[in-house]
Amino acid sequence: MGNLPKAEAFKFPLDLGAPEGSLEGKARPVDNGSDVLDPSRYYSREFMQKEWQTLWPRVWLLAAVTADIREPGDYTLFQHGHEEFLVVRQDDGSIKAFYNACPHRGNRVCQVDRGTADSFTCPFHSWQFGCDGKLQKIVDEETFNPKLIAHRPGLTEVRTDTLGGLVFVNMDGKAPPLKEWMGLPEGYIEAYGLETMNLVRHTRSEWSSNWKTGVDTFYETYHLPHIHPQTQGSIEEFCQIDLYKNGFSRMIMWFGIKSHRHEVSHERDLDEGAKIFLRDAGIDPETYTGTVADTRRDIQIAKRERAQRLGLKEWDKLTDGQLSDGWITGMFPNVQMGMHAEGVFIMRFVPHPTDPEKFIYDNVLLYRHLEEPNYNVPTWMAMPKDVDVTGATRPDIERWPADQEPAIGPVLLQDFELVPNVQRGLKSRGFKGPLWGEQEQRIRHFHKEVDRYINGEN
Amino acid sequence: MGALAAVTRLRIAKLSELPPDTNRVFKLGGTSVLLCRTEAGVFAVENRCTHQLASLEGGRMRGRHLFCPKHGARFDMGTGATAGTLAKTPIKTYRVHIDADDNITIDWPQSSSPHSDGVTDMTQVQTSKQIVTRFLELFSSGAVDETMAMMTDDATWWVAGTMPISGTYDKAAFAKLLSGVLDTCTGPIRITPRTFIAEGDRVALEAESFTQTRNGRNYNNLYHFVFVVRDGKIAIVKEYLDTMHANAILCSA
Ligand code: FES
Ligand code: FES
Ligand SMILES: [Fe+2]
């Protein structure tokens, strides 16, 4: 496939030409207009309050991955702003979630990130609760007015649902069923088999911007050649963009092939980044005979061949495109997932408990381990050395003090440094509101949906 | 006796007494030790969470990790290291050895004795008592091999009096005697300890036994035992008993 269009012919928007209605197929265009939105949404406390009234309680929030709670009694905490939830696998295999607030005096009942337990004891006065949230014990119960505790106060339950290895909670309990609410095409998440992956890295850092500034940054590839120039030789920034219902969206990014605007003096001049992608697919770049235009296709062929050799059934369901490309998937409101055959990157843009100009960037890497010496975590996933990826040990969350650079790899660090600068300008008297182009249409789609909640339409 | 070593090896249990994925408390001196077994191995830790000092007994385990059953603090059972921010201090751990006969021993720090100034070694006393208690439990179960495994190779057993079975036995001879006596009984000889007096490696106790012989008679004796303990095992036993009753029931069976 050496017939990649020349730079001048390479046009946005990209359409991969997959059949309409297929997972890869181009979605019908959505007209989100061209209004310029008031930038106060990025910093005002009023807007933050509105989000807490009409957005966060009404949506499904990604709370956990099932890889973290496989056995009965396994639990994990999920923080969202000032709220926190305790997500617990039940004896019957179902999942329940509770507000992590003691009915006695409000203390956080569970204070460890995750674990496995028969019951939960509040550290303040040792009231005890079952994995089902029910009250089990009040210390010195005879010293309480029986009327006060007649309702046997347990942990307050919150509605949960799961889809393809992901666990969600809905605070007000009134959202449509998760499957209905989920704007992605049917079977989209399930195709990757997240349940069979292990969580191999979890980082959590504090970024200096509104959570939506964070979402905006990761929702477009327009900034790639400028903020991440090192990716030019191995990633195409023009992508297929698909807008789905309920604020969901996707962009298909070509990995392992040079950008159309990246100039090479010879068509065999492979960039170091492209060589890494080739190597990850089992191709030796030193003996590789293809041109800069062939790499994506050859990576697909090599991966398909290897999957067959290794009996990797999960990949049978994936198209060739899914083997080489990143399906960067926006789950409204605050999640983006980089879907790849080998693993999935989940980023959550979690609102700060009190400050509209900060968010928590929570980044989880799921990876399917194979007992195969020639198969490893793709290099671009930037796993630190010596991390156990077999799933035997679930790594602890890596955290950094607010004033310290997080060790999240050079590319994400570029975004980390970018974001406070954007946040600052958004607040300027001189800034009149974002002017989003077509490469940024996912951002507009997202904000339009936010506004439907803020205006009480959803 | 030579100079005190920094650690002494204490035999605590047989591997078979600690099923996989369980943990069990042993009292050693004033210290409660939790012996834990998972697919990652056998571990011994001080049975006290460094968060709010709860017992760790019954805490769930995964690999090398133990979760405090109270608030879930997680500890590495090999190193004692904590994870997360709840418990700030590691828990104490003890090195575990398992010998070819599946005896679990741990390295016990002698300096942790509350009376290491030479007055009374309480740790040793409690430990000796516990070893004798375990020994009598094994004896009462009728498992001859396990019982013998808890005796030192040069152990001796002396039976008081002038009965045909009175006298001093070495380990092999005593094993034979015990098997022979058990063959005439319908079940094990259960020995229930009543009171203990212990000093250093010596334990004295009163006890009562019960079993039935195959010819339908009850054997129910009263004893005074003296045990000497060494390296977590029984080295010397002296058995004072009602010899007339023993002779009548056991030697005529
Ligand atoms: S606040 Fe939880 S027991 Fe008092
Ligand atoms: S007492 Fe063990 S975690 Fe609190
Ligand atoms: Fe970026």
Image: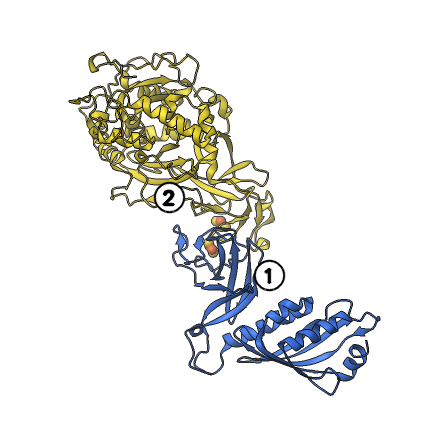
Chain colours: A yellow, B blue
Label 2 close to label 1 by CB (< 8 Å): no
Q: Amino acid at mark 2?
A: Ile
Q: Nearer the viewer, residue B127 or A441?
A: B127
How crowded pointer 2 is (Cα within 10 Å; few <14, some 14-19, many 20+) is rated as: some
How crowded pointer 1 is (Cα within 10 Å; few <14, some 14-19, many 20+) is rated as: few
Horizontal and vertical percent position of residue A257 = 27, 24
| Residue furthest right as drawn | B215
Tell which tag, 2 or 1, sits nearer the viewer.
1
Does A135 sit left or right of A451 as displayed?
A: right
Task: Establish if A458 lies above or below B63.
Answer: above
Instruction: Report the chain holding disc 1.
Output: B
Residue A397 is tagged as 2
Horizontal and vertical percent position of residue A157 = 52, 37
Q: Which residue is mark 1?
A: B17
When asked about the image quadrant of residue B13, the answer is: bottom right
| Residue furthest bottom as drawn | B162
The C terminus of chain A: image quadrant: top left
When asked about the image quadrant of residue A131, the answer is: top right
Horizontal and vertical percent position of residue B238 = 64, 82
Task: Establish if A58 lies above or below B90.
Answer: above
